[in-house]
Image (cartoon, rainbow, N blue to C red):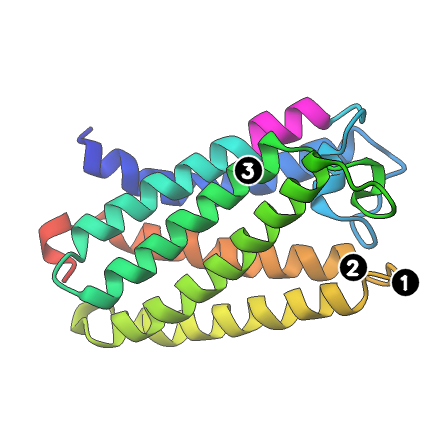
């Protein structure tokens, strides 16, 4: 397998590993609520699933997003806007890595103002908004690629849906009314975009994507 193919495969596998980590870690904590609690709480400091979620969920999938972004940058190097879109996707990966390296306090909220929690929150926020921006920019780029034009509308829909669900998560954070559900819907639709985009490119040669 070539390096290019391996990087493309990272885009296919990252969403699968991310979903599997969330489901697996959640299954180990019967009291955990996917409806109300943040994904990050599966990796909160001192929890039974902290190590697994941080180093089998956040960090590896973040690295895989960076690898896929590098593949996109090379494959679409003839499009200037694509370079920015790929950089945003890489920034999302870096943000996810940071969110895994720096754990949050139990509940990922409240009075804890430790440096680790602050960096976790910053990393997660940067990651979310970066991938939303990347998705929307790719919607523009793909309109200019005849063979991939069908993915343009899908990219816009996923980007807008991801933003709406993220805003709903922030709006419901104080009451924790569906906060976890909104976060998972946002992360889920954005992860689906990565999976579909990467799978669509899997059978294409890098120099023919533009």
Query: Would residue 154 be visible to someone looking at this image?
Result: yes
Question: Which residue is at a point 29% across and 38% down the rendered structure image?
Answer: 7
Q: Is residue 183 left or right of residue 129?
A: right
Quarter of the figure that contains the C terminus:
bottom left
Q: Position of residue 36 (x, y in %)?
A: 83, 54
Q: Is residue 39 left or right of residue 30?
A: left
Could you tell me what secondary structure mostly forms the magenta stretch? helix
Secondary structure state at the residue bearing disc 2: helix
Q: Residues within 10 Å of mark 1 (few under 14, many from 20)?
A: few
Is 104 inside the magenta-drawn segment?
A: no
Query: Would residue 149 be visible to someone looking at this image?
Result: no
- Compared with 198, 13 (above or below) is above
Q: Position of residue 134 (x, y in %)?
A: 40, 62
- Compared with 113, 128 (above or below) is below
Q: Is residue 112 left or right of residue 154?
A: right
Q: Which residues are magenta?
A: 50-57
For label 2, the residue is 179
Q: For the residues carrying marks 3 and 2, which lies nearer the camera in this image? A: 3
Q: Position of residue 40 (x, y in %)?
A: 70, 42
Quarter of the figure that contains the N terminus:
top left
In the foreground, 148 or 180? 180
Question: Which residue is at a point 30% across and 61% down the rendered structure image?
Answer: 84
Q: Is residue 47 left or right of residue 149?
A: right
Disc nearer the start of the sequence (1/3):
3
For label 1, the residue is 175
Per the rendering, the mark at residue 98 is 3
Secondary structure state at the residue bearing disc 3: helix
């Amino acid at each position: 397998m070539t390096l290019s193919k391996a990087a493309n495969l990272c885009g296919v596998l990252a969403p699968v590993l991310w979903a599997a980590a969330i489901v697996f870690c959640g299954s180990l904590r019967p009291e955990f609520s996917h409806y109300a609690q943040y994904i990050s709480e599966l990796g909160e400091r001192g929890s039974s699933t902290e190590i697994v979620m941080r180093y089998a969920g956040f960090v590896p999938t973040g690295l895989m997003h960076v690898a896929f972004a590098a593949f996109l940058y090379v494959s679409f190097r003839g499009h200037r806007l694509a370079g920015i879109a790929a950089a945003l996707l890489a920034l999302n990966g870096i943000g996810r890595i940071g969110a895994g390296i720096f754990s949050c306090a139990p509940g990922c909220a409240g009075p804890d103002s430790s440096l680790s929690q602050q960096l976790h929150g910053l990393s997660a926020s940067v990651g979310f908004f970066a991938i939303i921006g990347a998705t929307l920019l790719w919607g523009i780029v793909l309109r200019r690629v005849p063979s991939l034009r069908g993915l343009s509308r899908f990219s816009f829909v996923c980007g807008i849906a991801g933003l709406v669900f993220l805003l709903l998560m922030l709006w419901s954070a104080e009451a924790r009314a569906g906060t976890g559900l909104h976060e998972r819907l946002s992360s889920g639709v954005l992860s689906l975009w990565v999976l579909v985009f990467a799978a669509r490119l899997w059978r294409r040669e890098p120099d023919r994507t533009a």
